[in-house]
Image: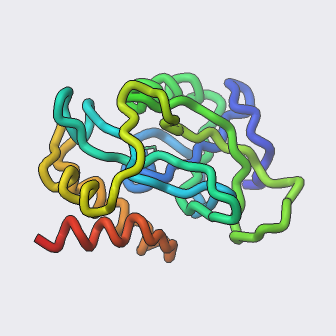
Amino acid sequence: MDITENSGDKAGGAWIFGYGSLVWRPDFPFIEKRVAAIKGWERRFWQGSTDHRGVPGAPGRVVTLIKSAGALCHGMAYRVEGAVYEDVMATLDHREKGGYSLISLTLTYDGSTVEDPGAPEALVYIATEGNPNYLGPATLDHIAAQVRRSWGPSGHNVEYVTRLAEALRHMNAHDDHVFALEHLVLAE
Ligand code: SIN
């Protein structure tokens, strides 16, 4: 199927870009998936999770995106058909309700830094500073300790880190932040 500009509606469907749990556990119907990246963004374990990998009062840490000039964040892009678009978005809005909002970003497939006017837009869940569960920067040691002691309704926080790292390796995608954190959480 040709990649077309995402209109993000019932008629045209949409591309959805996942960079966290959506990489390894999309759990929604799609007609195509591709390893993709977004330019100018970096993945960080700066979002607190009280509904998936932690509980209220003891949040786990999950990923969000921060702007970073020249960076490339790899993930998985999924093409969702118009017929199921509204149902998929309702399910994902519920799943990502712990502080994420939806933005539209341009995908790249070859990591090129050259602007491609034909590149498709994708919907991306991002947790920005100011959402109630936002935790922000911390040392990797601090993040690792928090991940090691956290669990929630979706499972242990360590599993979130290791599944993401495994999925990125499988895609031949490198992410220093994720791989260094994986090393730390598995070190004990
Ligand atoms: C995503 O995977 O794209 C959003 C964050 C998450 O659900 O882990």
Rendered residue at 69%/59% (across/down):
69
Is residue 36 placed above or below 64 in the rendered structure?
Answer: below
Of residue 121 and residue 14, the one placed in the foreground of this image is 121
134 to the left or right of 87: left
Is residue 107 placed above or below 152 in the rendered structure?
Answer: below
Q: Is residue 91 visible?
A: no
Rendered residue at 17%/35% (across/down):
58
User: How was this image coloured?
Assistant: rainbow
Which quadrant would residue 33 be assigned to in this image? bottom right
Which quadrant would residue 76 be assigned to in this image? bottom right
Where residue 28 appears, as percent x and y from the top left, is 45, 39
- Quadrant of the frame with the N terminus: bottom right
Rendered residue at 21%/38% (across/down):
54
- Quadrant of the frame with the C terminus: bottom left
4 to the left or right of 126: right
Rendered residue at 57%/23% (across/down):
86
137 to the left or right of 157: right
Q: How many marks?
A: 0
Of residue 68 and residue 24, the one placed in the foreground of this image is 68
Where residue 160 appears, as percent x and y from the top left, is 28, 53
86 to the left or right of 120: left
Where residue 38 appears, as percent x and y from the top left, is 65, 56
Where residue 31 appears, as percent x and y from the top left, is 58, 47
Of residue 41 and residue 13, the one placed in the foreground of this image is 41
Q: Is residue 113 visible?
A: yes
State which image quarter holds ligand 1.
top left
